[in-house]
Amino acid sequence: MKTALITGANKGIGYEVARQLASKGFHVFVGARNAKAGRKAAEEMGKKCGKATFLEIDVADNDSVKKAAREFSNSEDHLDVLVNNAGVVVDGDEAILEISDDLFRKTLETNTLGALRVTRAFVPLLRKSKAPRVINVSSGSGQLTGGADGWAPAYSISKSALNGVTSQLAAALPKFAVNSVCPGWVRTDMGGKNANRSVEEGADTIAWLATEAPQELTGKFLRDRKEIAW
Ligand SMILES: NC(=O)c1ccc[n+]([C@@H]2O[C@H](COP(=O)([O-])OP(=O)(O)OC[C@H]3O[C@@H](n4cnc5c(N)ncnc54)[C@H](OP(=O)(O)O)[C@@H]3O)[C@@H](O)[C@H]2O)c1
């Protein structure tokens, strides 16, 4: 059975990606830092769609990430798909010159370093897959091409840096497919009610990269199943 770990899967886009992969026959690990919410999400998914197991993981905490990898390896001998989905927006309309070091660090800790440290911890298990895939959930706000619009600078920079992590990991892991995805503007707690996409639409390219996309497709930034500029 194929296995997938999705971080921040207790709600939003992560939940929907996990739900879609469980429906496609994956044994899905619902990663969440909040044990109550994570367990509830995994139970719901298990009842409706397939095999889902809660895995406690706070991507901003190295010890938690290492513990999660140990726990995962107690029941599974390999991981096929890792979706680094967990993310935070700590800033809003503050200008780049007004954000504090602390806010910047908090944002990078989760959105950029978080994805790297989870990948590092799970690489030994991913190496045991026949076709390992890592998907980093990024954002068009981190796109450098075309210039910034000034919204949420710390968040946007953390996603530009996440794209850098994707590119470096793709070079370091030639047998893997490692890509960044912009899900579009999606109706979640983060995206808000006015966003123009449903979670199903937001999850589509991520689930596609996890399943049907060619294994040779790596080191790219995608939206709507197509490559976009960094
Ligand atoms: N929604 C959009 O329009 C949009 C657009 C572009 C990119 N994205 C990206 O898509 C991803 C998912 O966002 P979303 O819209 O689904 O947001 P969301 O509904 O706010 O969900 C974010 C998820 O990340 C989790 N999380 C945050 N910090 C974490 C940590 N340190 N460890 C583990 N989990 C953590 C949250 O857990 P808690 O429930 O415990 O807080 C939650 O499960 C994010 O990376 C986001 O940047 C979203």
Image (spheres, rainbow, N blue to C red):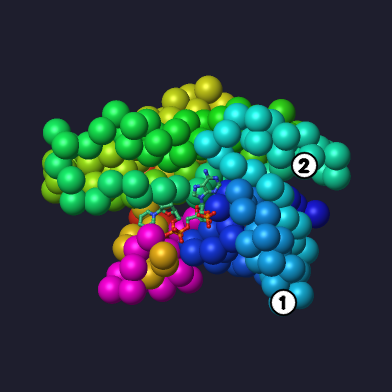
Q: Which residue does the image show at 69% across and 66% down from the upper left?
A: 40
For residue 160, say whether it is visible: no
Residue 196: % across, % down? 30, 72
Specify which label sits upstream in the sequence, 1 or 2.
1
Asked which quadrant contains residue 41, the reply is: bottom right
Of the residues shown, which amino acid type is indicated by label 1? Answer: Lys
Q: Amino acid at mark 2?
A: Phe
Contact? badges 1 and 2 (CB < 8 Å): no
Residue 179 percent location from the top left of the image? 46, 42
The span shown in magenta is 190-206
Per the image, the residue denoted by label 2 is 72
Q: Residue at x 16, y 37 (%)?
A: 98
Q: Which mark is residue 48?
A: 1
Is 111 drawn above or below residue 44 in the view shown?
above
Q: Identify the element where label 2 is drawn.
A: helix
Q: Is residue 189 left or right of residue 29?
A: left
Does any atom of ligand 1 lie closer than 8 Å to the CB of label 2? no
> Tag 1: Cα neighbours inside 10 Å, few (<14), some, or many (≥20)?
few
